[in-house]
Amino acid sequence: MNSSISDSEREGLAWRRWLRRYAAFTAAIALVLAAAILALDPYDTGRFAVFPSRGVPHFGQRLTVASIARSPEIDAAIIGNSTAQLIDPHRIGTGTGLHMASLAIPGTGPAEQLAVLGWLLRRHRGPALRALVMGIDGSWCGSESDVAPLFPFPFWLYGESRLDYAARMLRLQGLEHAFRKVKLLLGTAPAEQDFGYDDYDSNKPWDEAGFRVRLAERRIRRAPDPDAEANSVHAPIAELSHLLQSLPPRAAVVLVLLPVHRTALPPPGSAEAGRMERCKEAFGSLAAKRPHTAIVDYLHDGEIADRDENFWDAVHYRTPVARRLEADISAAASRLMADE
């Protein structure tokens, strides 16, 4: 029996050795990249981080709020969507002595905002929060379809599972954002503002023609819900009540029912109007049961809702209205913190 190895066999062995080395090298590179991404902690969550954090680059609120919310420099926060975005945390802080940040994320509803609140509460068990402002828009009083998220949201970023977080990070976007974090650490890229406020209105003239167009578009999109009463849900309010139990009992909670243009209010006597009233009653019950909790209600007809120039569209008010909200929030928070 011939024990010699043919040239083709030697070539096959060499090829298999090369493939094994290539696979091992590729796996090693992947592990190094994975470890680097997690160690760089692009979103400044504190998970797996090795390098000192200096905030996050401009990723957009969905990804940057995780960093702002865990800052030890804050003791109060505003949570909501774009309808709470013009509320200035610094103005409220000046009137109350609070170190407040805005965690408002456009395009979110109760599910996303409750996820952000849970993240905030878990990150401030040591340095306890002194106050919380919840910007309540119509989605909190809606039907099942209203409560469901309208846009993709990184629940994995604000959740408790480190495994889910790590798996989500090891994707192309995680690698791209890790490179942007390196630039931030090297001082070649700016950091996101550490208090989260985004003023999209100041020094901009009111566009009456654009306002009319946006109102007309909303009327076309918005169809009355004939089953508004039957589909009413208050599950998000119940979950909010549960999460608020994690706050220190003396922490001030201000629930702000945000104003809308008169065309966005339900017709008196309609099923939708009844649903809104029951929703307000549910928030009222929450406030009555939890100490140091108040409601600031602007969600009704009146001077603000009736004036077109107060709004950019049916649900987004302008800066003068925001200043009034800030004054009322500051007054309510100060009163709650002073109560024994």
Image (cartoon, rainbow, N blue to C red):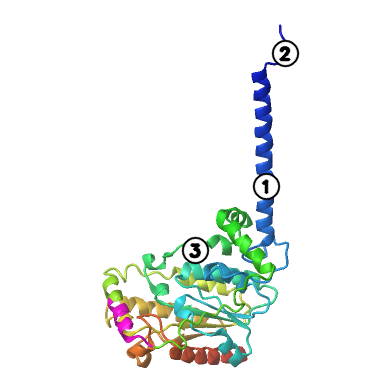
Most extreme residue toward the top is: 1
Q: Which residue is mark 2?
A: 4
Please state the total of marks drawn on the protein image: 3
Secondary structure type for disc 1: helix
Of all residues, the one furthest to the front in this rendering is: 7
Q: Is residue 209 left or right of residue 111?
A: left
Q: Quadrant of residue 311?
A: bottom left
Q: Is residue 299 left or right of residue 53?
A: left
Q: Residues within 10 Å of mark 2 (few under 14, many from 20)?
A: few
Please give the residue where the numbered disc 1 appears in the rendered image.
29
Q: Residue at x 67, y 79 (%)?
A: 73
213 falls in the magenta region = yes
In the picture of the structure, the residue carrying the numbered disc 3 is: 153
Residue 100: where, in percent of width, then height?
60, 82
Nearest the viewer among 319 and 246 is 319
User: Is the residue under label 1 in contact with that under label 3 (CB below 8 Å)?
Assistant: no
Percent across and percent down for residue 282 are 43, 77
Magenta stretch secondary structure, dominant: helix
Against 327, residue 199 (above or below) is above
Of circles 2 and 1, which is in front? 2
Q: Amino acid at mark 2?
A: Ser
**Does residue 223 show up?**
no
Magenta-colored span? 206-216
Q: Visible in this render: residue 117? A: yes
Seen in the picture, residue 240 relative to 211 is either above or below; the reply is above
**In which quadrant of the rendered view does residue 15 lie?**
top right
Image coords of residue 281 (percent x, y): 41, 80
Q: Sequence order check: which comes first, mark 2 or mark 1?
A: 2
SS of the residue under disc 2: loop
Q: Residues within 10 Å of mark 1 (few under 14, many from 20)?
A: few
